[in-house]
Amino acid sequence: MSAKNRPYEQFGSFILFKKLETDALGDLWRAGRVDNGNLGPTMAVRRLLGGNRAALTASAADAHNLVPLLAGTTFAKDQTIDVANGIPFVAHEYAGGRSLRHIVDRARGGNGVSPNPIPLDQAIVIAEKIALSLSTTADLRYLGNRLAHGALIPQFVWITDEGEIRVGGQQLGKGLIASMSDTKVASELGRYFAAEYRASAEISKTTDVYSLGAILYLLVTGVEPPDAVTGSAFAQTIRAAKTFSGQPLPDDLRAILEKSLAIDPAARYATIGDMKQVLSGLVHGGNYSASTFNLAFYLSNLLKKELEGEALEREKESKVNAAAYAEAPVAVVTPMPTSSSDDAPAKSRVPLYAAAAAVVVAVAAGAFFILKPKPAPAVVARKAEPPKPQLISQPIVAAAPTTSTTAPLDPAAQKKAFEAAVQQKMQEEMMKLQSDMNRQLKQQQPKSTPVQTASLISPPQSDDRGSAAALDQRRVAAQPLTQTQAPAPAPVVPQPQTSAAAPPPLTQAPVSTVREGDLVDVQELDKVPQPLSTPRPNYPPLAAQQHAEATIILSTLISENGDVTDVKVLRGDARFGFNDSAIRAMRSVRFTPPMKDGKRVKTWRPQSITFAGH
């Protein structure tokens, strides 16, 4: 077969499109799976090339039989742990995602790229979702034994394009511990395992507790956790840890790190479920704005540049002739736990869905990670909802003072649809933040204050700060809400008609209680204030030099005359003066007066401003 017909390397039933990572354990590829001669879904394939090959192969055989038990939103989707060409591997759905290892490395910056630290809020939500996956695994039994992950490292945590955290690589612990004899593997990965686990390879209830503590340390500090075996002053290092941005760690996070990373297993959380409960308390406690949307939005900015070129690559990959690879397939061999001279036959897989090229456009905050075009029925359902005043708050993009000669990546129609999806997602998040702020203002308002504030009436929106296990339930529950039709009227029993139908009783029209100058929720307005001129924020010079980007969400208090009297930051970025530049831009704008029941009123109106460098 000519190289022209087979331009990519083949690995088992996978076509290796692009290498994404390389480390001591092996490499990670974006790949296409060949299903019955057709190109199946895009997969992430991690080949375990380093360490103790024999031990990893045996662990992969054991894990292969357990993977079907790992179903749910916290586990790597469509995961396969197997052996091909004599190489153990872990494969799962790609979903436009990246591994936690890759994300942390990008957040650190370097090579001309400025650091973009992972916010503490998002570090906590990542850790809480990982803990949920681990605790779900611990509730499972196989052949009468309690399951555990046993191989939790950043490489096996996958974050999808929607900010979902999925965990893979389960049951590879024995192979990884045996691989600690490789000094390079031990140096990179040994720090994620407790000392007693490395010494005995025996999993206990606190094994995953320690590994999650090490990953939480990596998330909140941006540096590798200390090695309990080779590191000196281990406990002192943890107590002296600072955040990614160099600030002192909050006491609640420091306490979790000290307890989960205790050298003595008895001093740790007794189970991974106990640690999960503590992390969930932080997520729901109100001190952190932890949500998968915020995480996805952060990742869209962090990975924007490397994802901009991915659309063209994946479009090319989607057109590969899979039949050329299926003509001479490389068998996937699954060695069984008991040694045998016969190779287990490769399992055929049923085609799941055709691969589709991802649409990536440098729009707004580069929101590749947070948006996928929504299916048409959802749009129809939204149109069927009772009419509400349409909040039109177009995102403002402040481009860096540089020129670009890059041609558009996508056709105009695709770009327009994607921009609309970006704006819709951004508006939903802005209104959620604005609603939270309105509730806080109402709580702070004295009861005797005569100002009329209309109640907030908005479509039901799920709070995605809950556990990952409830994520799918909320999505399923939300779908009927948008498509439910009004119930059919009950049958009416005909009555003898003796006279003309009486006219309906007259009811007095409700008297408006809104007065001129009252503060009214923006979603209750008859006319939403619109800017009379386009805000023009200045791109901070230092940010432009560092190619730094940010999206700031503001709330602007607009008076009954259309003047801006106050501006608050709903979600900002303290670096390089982004917040100040956005605030100054909004203070200089005048608006049309907000209107309610024919009267001019005041309102808080949300607005996003994106600083997008090139």
Image: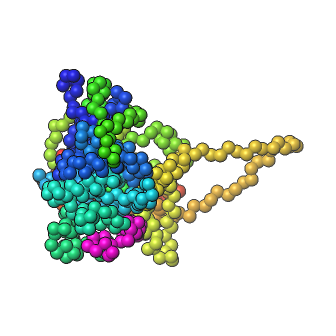
Residue 573 location in percent, x, y? 25, 61
- Say whether residue 581 is visible: no
Residue at far top of view: 1
The front one of 359 and 317 is: 317
Q: Is residue 269 magenta?
A: yes
**Res. 547 visible in picture:** yes
Question: Which residue is at 31% across, 45% downward?
Answer: 339
Look at the image and name its color scheme. rainbow
Which quarter of the image is occupied by the N terminus?
Answer: top left
Q: Which is more toward the observer, 233 or 62?
A: 62
- Report x, y in % for residue 414: 33, 35
The image quarter in which residue 562 lies? bottom left
Q: Which residues are magenta?
A: 260-289
- What is the total number of numbered labels drawn onto the structure image? 0
What residue sits 44% from the left and 54% below the top?
143
Question: Percent x, y for residue 451?
Answer: 49, 70
Residue occupying image coordinates x 49% and y 53%: 473
Residue in the foreground of this view, choosing between 197 and 299:
197
Could you say which quadrant of the image residue 485 lies in?
Answer: top right
Is 392 on the left-hand or right-hand side of 360? right
The residue depicted at 36 percent of the width and 71 percent of the height is 269
Q: Let me know if residue 165 is in the magenta part.
A: no
The relative height of residue 413 versus residue 229 in the rendered view (above or below) is: above
In this view, 443 is above or below 606: below
Relative to 318, residue 250 above or below: below
Pinpoint residue 445: horizontal percent, then vertical percent.
Answer: 45, 73
